Amino acid sequence: MSDGDGVYRRDVLKASSAAAVALGLGGGGYISSLAETDDEPFSQKDPGIDSFVGQDEVFKSACSPNCRGKCPLEVHVRDGRVRKIEPQVPEDERYKRACLLGLSHTQRIYNPTRLKYPMKRVDWSPDSPNPQGRGEDAEFERVTWDEALDLVAEGMTRVKDTYSPESVLFHAGSGNYGINSTVESRLANLFGGSTPGWSIDANVGRGFNRITGHGYYLPQTNESEDWENAKTFIAWGTDIFSSQLQMDASKLLDMKEQGGKLVVVDPVYTTTASKADLWLPVNPGKDVHLILGMMNYVLDMGLEDTEFLRKRTTAPALIGPDGTMLDAKGVIEGVTESKPVGVDEQTGELVALEPETPGSYVLTGTYTVDGKSYETALSRLKGHVADYPVEEMAEISGVPAKNIRKAARWLATRGPGGIAPSYAIGRYIHGHVFGQAYAIMLALTGDYGKHGNVHAHHPLGASLDTGGWGSPDDAPGSKTLYFHEYADAMLNGDPRQIKAVYSIESNMLGNQFPNRQRHLKGIENLDMFVVADIHHTPTVQQADIILPAAHWFETEDIVSSWGSHPHITYRHKVQEPLWESRDDYYMIRDLAKKLGFGDYFPEEKREVLRTMSDGDDRFDFDELRERGTAHLGTPTVKYTGEFPTPSGRIELYDEDAPSEKGVDLQLPKPIESRTAEDYEGADEYPLIFMQKHGRFRLHSQFEYQQWIREINPEPQLDIHPKDAEARGIEDDDYVRVHNDRGEMVVKAKLNDAMKPGLVNTDQGWWTRDYVKGHHNDLTHDEVSDVGKTFSFYDVRVEVEPAPDDIDTSKYEGNQPTGADASSAGVGGD
Ligand SMILES: Nc1nc2c(c(=O)[nH]1)N[C@H]1C(S)=C(S)[C@@H](COP(=O)(O)OP(=O)(O)OC[C@H]3O[C@@H](n4cnc5c(=O)[nH]c(N)nc54)[C@H](O)[C@@H]3O)O[C@H]1N2
Ligand SMILES: Nc1nc2c(c(=O)[nH]1)N[C@H]1C(S)=C(S)[C@@H](COP(=O)(O)OP(=O)(O)OC[C@H]3O[C@@H](n4cnc5c(=O)[nH]c(N)nc54)[C@H](O)[C@@H]3O)O[C@H]1N2
Ligand code: SF4
Ligand SMILES: [Mo]
């Protein structure tokens, strides 16, 4: 039953208005500590196991951190309090989902780390920023919303007048997939500020794009409901059962039940590897060697899909001695546009290669045209991969030769399938070369455009098309600043000086950015740092102005399912924002008013949601509100048409390829940085350090969740027993992990699933969770010319027993919340 407001009421016995929820109704350990009332403490019984049947108001909402879930939820409210969360059945029922994190929002919404009031650093003002007052010991005082936004507007205007409008950066992270980052961009465009470009997760996709025209983040792939049709699924550097656990992982099991083979390429024996038919334990950073070995085998054995190569790739295209492709324009009469040229097998004549056109084109060989010798792109590729024989690649990659052959044979001969890389390979600095290489490998095996094909470990999902709402026609517009440019922009004015930052949905100094100390220095150079967040994160602690954002259940929104299922979800407001927190929309609207752009932001957010929806003809706004989700009709099978490349075909040979570190990349060649054996610092820092995306947190969100802490109480360093023994380290010892940038102290966990030489600490922990330091004190912010992506895992460290005098008292005794949750007092209590 619906009340017409999209809110479902199931047998409401105790009808209670959601709006009536406020402090002190109920209570609980958390809320009573925050409520500043003398209400009776809430029953200590876990609210999750209460019986609710027939007593709840049920609201439709969504969980939306940057995982691949974006799970539609049903939120149960009783007596004015959120009691229980359940998965909501979306339009396509096969995508019903939710993990423990999403089901634990009862703990998040009443958590003591929530920010409660707008705050100002006591020694900061727009004309006297006192940057030295920032940091761990910064003190804050409560201000009204009006005062806070006045100060922000004044700070922005000052920076605009003193430097330029672009010196104000409107930053957004990946904390929430509602509309508010678009709302923030609208203000940025009106103001003429800087807006963020992503230098995270983009590496592999960039390489893939050079060959197929698709991809920036991971390229599109068939919807996961189709994965069961794969005959061979190579999960390449992805622990799907940890990082896509909510839904897509189960599709691998469906595939196995249908007889498909699961191959896992990972230096770690992960949960996903434990389900594999074949595990290839590659050495970190050697993926390009490995895939070149596989290509070598496929071409050597003649297993390539010749029909596909002729119809959809540039395999038959003639390449000249100087590396340029022969152009049909000027060579073949009547052709007026640039096109690659092939040779007809039957007639021996030159033909222009049209997209999506089969023909009896010659695939290999050398031809003379106008006295010059040309060879086909496939011949070039064959010649190239001949330099990467299987046995040699086995030696380098650490994968037995027979298993390299087996994986390649399965992929090439068992029918449709594919390679599903993750972002991990892109966390090595030249990871784009892998993107280039596997795009070509899947062209050899003909794995594009069919049921059962796979190109990434998650599909792209469905996003609301916000039209041009983020950039009004009459706005001066904004300038992109890539994440990897932030530190230099703040410190050195390169490529332009940044002096103020307004940040939403990001924990940039607590997890998002590598080389934390350098970014902290950058922040020191700002005149104003404004952070809006739900929780008191390490980034919030560095702010001059703190703006408390509403929890997701306290906002109305439309949630896109980036990287996930094919629906968008309507988020109904379950309760009013607690304390003085606010939906970011209203903060930005009021700030816009103070900056003179008030007319551009309607009073009510729903009006904006409606306007955006009206511009997207794939769904109806009112139906979406009523139903909760809308399937946007994305096609299940991808890559069925012409490729968006100059030739309309997959370009096996990249004529205009960039070169990097002196290596030209017309065809994929391994380039390494810190994983190379001869890397300069390899002796001093012999271990590769990664920070896996573990199942216990979503980046740094849910760090404070008590249920999770009970099973995963503190950060740890996964280290192979041999590496530990060589350093005199035993299980559960505290260790110092260090390199030339910084250090951290964590508990060691001996783990023989790790490849020796590789250590790991799951990302997502806040500074307060470490005994000392932070994982991003060890990472660097270098990017490659082509990949332009932070290489979080291309990092070397050394590990030693921690000094005797470290203070580990926060983890002594049985403290399920682990680190000192109660010290998060800045929220205003
Ligand atoms: N639970 C949970 N899920 C998440 C996230 C989260 O924080 N928590 N984050 C989300 C986001 S934004 C992202 S980008 C994705 C990330 O998801 P992934 O990209 O899958 O995650 P990673 O943890 O970086 O790495 C996956 C695997 O790569 C392996 N690996 C490391 N080095 C190498 C190598 O050199 N070669 C190969 N072949 N494998 C290697 C690791 O051992 C690991 O098992 O996950 C998303 N999902
Ligand atoms: N060392 C290392 N660092 C990494 C990675 C790694 O592999 N290794 N992975 C990187 C990757 S792939 C990614 S995608 C990034 C993710 O980095 P971030 O984008 O910073 O992601 P989160 O940690 O989820 O932080 C989001 C913040 O937004 C807040 N938030 C949530 N909803 C809202 C809202 O509605 N309004 C406001 N104002 N705030 C809100 C949350 O409370 C949280 O503090 O981290 C990167 N950092
Ligand atoms: S954290 Fe991700 S997988 Fe878990 S419930 Fe939320 S959206 Fe779904
Ligand atoms: Mo990510």
Image (tube, helix red, strand yellow):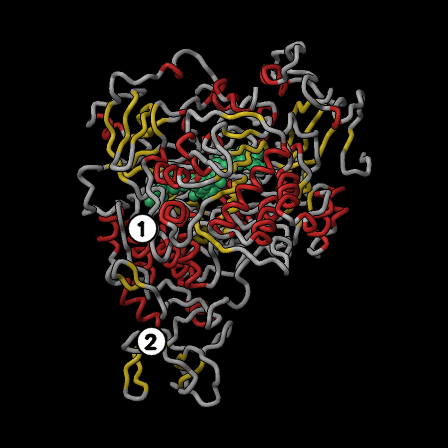
Residue type for callout 2: Thr
Mark 2 residue element: loop
Which of the two discs, 2 and 1, labels the residue nearer the N terminus? Answer: 2
In the foreground, 760 or 576: 576
Disc 2 packing (10 Å; few <14; some 14–19; many ≥20) = some
Q: CA–CA distance between discs 2 and 1?
A: 33 Å
Disc 1 packing (10 Å; few <14; some 14–19; many ≥20) = many
**Label 1 beta carbon within 8 A of ligand 1:** no
In the foreground, 458 or 542: 542
State the residue at coordinates (65%, 41%): 590
Mark 1 residue element: helix
State the residue at coordinates (66%, 45%): 593
In the foreground, 236 or 500: 500
Q: Is residue 822 visible?
A: yes
Q: Residue 102 in the image: state x and y as whole percent.
A: 58, 31
The numbered disc on residue 404 is 1
Quarter occupied by the C terminus: top right
Q: Is residue 316 above or below residue 714?
A: below
Q: Quadrant of residue 741?
A: top left
Q: Is residue 559 visible?
A: no
Q: Is residue 420 above or below residue 19?
A: below
Q: Residue 553 in the image: state x and y as whole percent.
A: 65, 32
State the residue at coordinates (28%, 54%): 671
Quarter occupied by the N terminus: top right
Residue type for callout 1: Ile
**Mark 2 highlights which residue?**
324
State the residue at coordinates (61%, 44%): 180
**Label 2 beta carbon within 8 A of ligand 1:** no
Left-right relation of 48 to 396 = right
Left-right relation of 666 to 465 = left
Left-right relation of 349 to 159 = left
Tag 2–tag 1 contact (CB < 8 Å): no
